[in-house]
Image (spheres, rainbow, N blue to C red):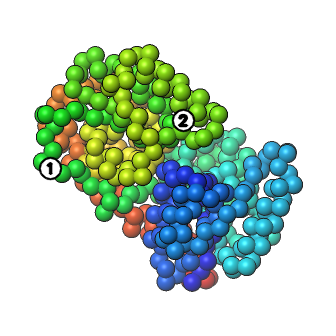
Amino acid sequence: MIPILYLSHCGSNIGGGEKQLYYLVTNLDQNIYKPFVICPDEGVFAELLRDANIPTSILNLPPWRKTRYRFSRHKAVATLTKFCVKNNIRLIHTSDSWLNPYLVAVKQSLNIPVISHVRTLLTSDQIKKYAFDKMDYTISISHQSKIPLIESGIAHEKIDVVLNCVDLSKFKPAPKNQDKKHSSFIVGIVGRIEPFKDQKTFVEIASLVVKQCQNIRFHIIGSALNTPKHRVYESVVRQQVSKLKLDNVIHFTGHRDDIHIAMQELDVLVTLSAGSVIAEAMASGKPVIGTPIGSTSEMIIDGVTGWVIPIEQIEGIVEKIIQLYNDRNLWKQMGVAAEKHAENTFSITEHVHKVQDVYNRLLSDSI
């Protein structure tokens, strides 16, 4: 078997990137590859990997460009290099672009191929800062996020687009006997409570919708990281809910380990960022309303499985929520289309197959 090392952004929490990494390492062809994972800290994700019998180690990789971390950075590179030698690592794949410089440092010492996974829309400055020109390959989760890489001079033949995937056996539509005529219509947003996810705008959307819809509720699913910045943002969002007198309409669920159940409880997902929650919602038979960020436009079939509406057009998002609330036939039709699209597009098998194709190209002499 060929040992591959994966660098994870987080070990203490499970976000979209961590879910995608878990799907990948637990579904690799075990006859060919042996995955190892390094996380920066202990926690639920590191334990999840170990429970799946994935060898998982902890190594803090401090920010590369900050001067005060110069000594600890070089020490981390040395430790990472020793780990690769000890385990005969043949390829390194990072699930977060900001770790790219560590891959470059190890590559220079050991001459092994390195891959970076792009999960956000990068600027040209970020592409330069994160040394994408020194990557042997880049995997992007959307064609939109591939464009800046090409515009910055990265050869298109060194980039593959691989959409996020979802565990179709876990995310399924809610029982068919659910009677929406006699229960609240629930609109949700899923993800860490942070500025990028934009729960603040979600609250604003809710305030406009409830003026025209009576039996409707909104779920904010997720929690804030325990940092001053994220705690402040959560406080701002909660204050906004109270200021708009929406305490009885908007429910903060906190972190949910049973996100597949949380998705079943929703009728519509609204995402103002992007990510694997789109695939999860559609696999659960839910229409999705998103904004043209990252992979969203490539995951949602506009007008069929949901809608893609610019964030500046908040009234348009409000209008679509109200339309689905009032037209339950359209809601059901879009839900069925979403489920079918997820089955055809977001399977783990297809995702892993495409990533392994990249490995095969880089390691052809070893397979």
Measured as percent of width and height from the top left, residue 5 is found at 63, 69
| Number of residues whose C-alpha sits closer than 10 Å to that of mark 1, classed few (under 14), some (14–19) or many (20 or more) | few
Measured as percent of width and height from the top left, residue 48 is found at 50, 63
Looking at the rendered image, the quarter that the C terminus falls into is bottom right
Lower sequence index among marks 1 and 2: 1
Q: Is residue 280 left or right of residue 179?
A: right
The answer to whether residue 119 of the structure is visible from this angle is yes
152 is higher (above) or lower (below) than 327: below
Mark 1 and mark 2: Cα distance apart in space: 34 Å
| Number of residues whose C-alpha sits closer than 10 Å to that of mark 2, classed few (under 14), some (14–19) or many (20 or more) | many
The residue carrying mark 2 is 194
Question: On the image, which quarter does residue 113 sit in?
Answer: bottom right
The answer to whether residue 155 of the structure is visible from this angle is no
- Residue at (23, 33) in percent of width and height: 185
Q: Amino acid at mark 1?
A: Lys
- Residue at (75, 52) in percent of width and height: 62
**Element under label 2?**
loop
310 is higher (above) or lower (below) than 356: above
Looking at the rendered image, the quarter that the N terminus falls into is bottom right
Q: Nearer the viewer, residue 92 or 301?
A: 92
**Element under label 1?**
loop
202 is higher (above) or lower (below) than 211: below
Q: Is residue 94 left or right of residue 287?
A: right
- Residue at (80, 44) in percent of width and height: 66
Measured as percent of width and height from the top left, residue 36 is found at 60, 71
- Residue at (54, 69) in percent of width and height: 50
In the drawing, what numbered circle is on residue 244? none
Q: Are marks 1 and 2 in contact (CB under 8 Å)?
A: no
The residue carrying mark 1 is 176
